[in-house]
Image: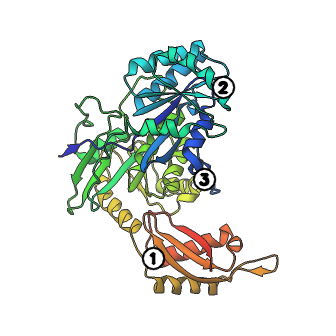
């Protein structure tokens, strides 16, 4: 089995003690992407992980201050957040504050970062006017090179910081062959992801890299199914690191899942049949839905559940109630231990991937839309009726449809949902979200 290392997008981590303005800097760099709001029940967006772009380079960005370590003492919490940044990032932006000057906490973090040998950019925040620039020179004493004066609240100086950051990104990795389907397994700790990976690959262990210096220890495993389809299983980076104080923190595992989702075509959301559905399961699945990935819900450890004739049906009903926004995702009950039903997975992943890339001819699509409008006439709002003129598919992965109307505001969420259901009835889109965008006809 061929195994090669393919790294994810370069990652910038923002670290620093509380109240220096890390989140403001994070939101500035992330731009509008972070403020996307999804009103679908059960989908949440945590302000801890986002993607950005600078000088044509895409990158991921982490706000370590959002990682909840509230049971830790103050200095220990800051230290552990810095350790997370050191583990995860290609480049670290260390945010300090010109108003308070250098504190003991700053010196403690600087010492950790200095020893990490990672590129560190020292940003002195809250330099809101030119007169304050004189305050930054004391920060040379931290031993991290030139301090960059910035103002997160006004957006000043961040371009210089990003210019410096992208210098450390290195060359882009080559894209994989488009015919290869990339998938990942995501879920809470202890749902059995590692065991499932081993069972799928037919290996006795998760293959680990012996190449030193890989930032995130991410190993992608390539294999070919019996049908000849090539797959790349994306490792949830660093999944095997154990015993660290932050490994069990919820936001940290969500952040790890985000990186895998970002690189996948299809995401397997793994649930533990023995423990039932938890809030964190919904949060992680919500990220995959938001990112528009193909989704399959995998219920693992099915061998441990005491069953009667209705057990599977009842569990499936509970999943549908808890994950209402994933009503399009197929559900597979498996056991990594006994390998029950695992032979169905490659074909299911392939099918979902095909559905993600399906294109619907405009003429056929418009027949479906006009029939839908005839069945359920468009709504009115304040005496004005929504008029649907025509529709066209504008993208795949996920399939995205623009529907041209007289007024965008008249397209209520419930009617868009009705049109989506009609499209799903007419075409097989199992396993993939669908985007419907109302546009005013010019």
Depth-wise, is mark 1 or mark 3 nearer the camera? 3
Left or right, 149 with respect to 229, comes to right
Distance of label 2 from label 3 (alpha carbons): 34 Å
Q: Where does label 3 land, which residue?
A: 36
User: Height in image: 227 above or below 288?
Assistant: below
User: Height in image: 406 above or below 2?
Assistant: below
Q: Where does label 1 land, which residue?
A: 427
Residue at the spot 61% in from the left edge and 38% down from the top edge: 156
Position of residue 46 measured from the top left corner of the image (x, y, whole percent): 58, 42
Could one spot residue 59 in this view of the protein?
yes
Comes first in the chain, label 2 or label 1 = 2
Distance of label 2 from label 1 (alpha carbons): 62 Å
Comes first in the chain, label 1 or label 3 = 3
User: How would you rate the neighbour count of disc 1 (Cα within 10 Å): few for under 14, some for 14-19, many for 20 or more?
Assistant: some
Residue at the spot 47% in from the left edge and 55% down from the top edge: 312
Q: Nearer the viewer, residue 85 or 111?
A: 111
Distance of label 1 from label 3 (alpha carbons): 29 Å
Secondary structure beneath dot 3 equals loop
Position of residue 432 measured from the top left corner of the image (x, y, whole percent): 45, 63
Position of residue 78 measured from the top left corner of the image (x, y, whole percent): 55, 21
Residue at the spot 39% in from the left edge and 39% down from the top edge: 192
Q: Where does label 2 land, which residue?
A: 132
Depth-wise, is mark 2 or mark 3 nearer the camera? 2
Q: Quadrant of residue 429?
A: bottom left
């Amino acid at each position: 089995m061929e195994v090669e290392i393919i790294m994810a997008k370069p990652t910038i981590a923002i670290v620093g003690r509380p109240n220096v303005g890390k989140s403001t800097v994070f939101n500035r760099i992330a731009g509008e992407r972070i403020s996307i709001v999804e009103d679908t029940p059960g989908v949440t967006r945590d302000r801890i992980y986002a993607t950005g772009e600078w000088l044509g380079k895409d990158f991921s960005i982490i706000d370590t201050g959002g990682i909840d370590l509230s049971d830790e003492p103050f200095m220990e919490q800051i230290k552990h957040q810095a350790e997370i940044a050191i583990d995860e990032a290609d480049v670290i932006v260390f945010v300090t504050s010109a108003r308070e000057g250098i504190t003991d906490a700053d010196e403690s973090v600087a010492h950790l970062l200095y020893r990490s040998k990672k590129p560190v950019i020292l940003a002195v925040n809250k330099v809101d006017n030119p007169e304050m620039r004189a305050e930054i020179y004391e920060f040379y004493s931290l031993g991290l090179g030139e301090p960059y004066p910035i103002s997160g609240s006004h957006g000043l100086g961040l371009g210089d910081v990003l210019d410096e950051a992208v210098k450390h990104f290195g060359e882009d990795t080559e894209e994989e062959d488009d015919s290869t389907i990339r998938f990942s397994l995501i879920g809470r700790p202890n749902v059995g992801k590692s065991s499932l990976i081993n069972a799928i690959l037919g290996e006795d262990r998760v293959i680990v890299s012996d190449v030193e210096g890989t930032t995130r220890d991410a190993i992608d495993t390539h294999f070919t199914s019996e049908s000849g389809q090539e797959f790349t299983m994306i490792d949830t980076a660093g999944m095997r690191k154990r015993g660290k104080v932050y490994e069990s923190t919820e936001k940290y595992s969500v952040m790890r899942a985000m990186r895998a989702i970002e690189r996948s075509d299809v995401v397997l959301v793994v649930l533990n049949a023995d423990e039932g559905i938890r809030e964190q399961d919904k949060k992680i699945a919500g990220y995959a839905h938001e990112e528009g990935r193909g989704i399959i819900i995998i219920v693992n450890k099915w061998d441990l559940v005491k069953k009667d004739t209705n057990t599977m049906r009842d569990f499936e009903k509970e999943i549908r109630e808890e994950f209402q926004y994933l009503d399009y995702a197929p559900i597979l009950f498996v056991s990594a231990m006994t390998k029950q039903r695992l032979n169905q997975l490659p074909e299911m992943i392939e099918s979902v991937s095909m559905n993600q890339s399906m294109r619907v001819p405009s003429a056929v699509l418009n027949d479906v839309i006009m029939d839908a409008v005839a069945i359920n006439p468009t709504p009115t709002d304040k005496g004005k009726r929504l008029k649907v003129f025509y529709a066209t598919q504008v993208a795949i992965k996920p399939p995205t449809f623009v529907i041209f109307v007289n007024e965008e505001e008249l397209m209520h969420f419930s009617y868009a949902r009705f049109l989506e259901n009609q499209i799903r009835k007419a075409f097989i889109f199992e396993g993939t979200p669908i985007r419907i965008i109302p546009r005013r006809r010019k």
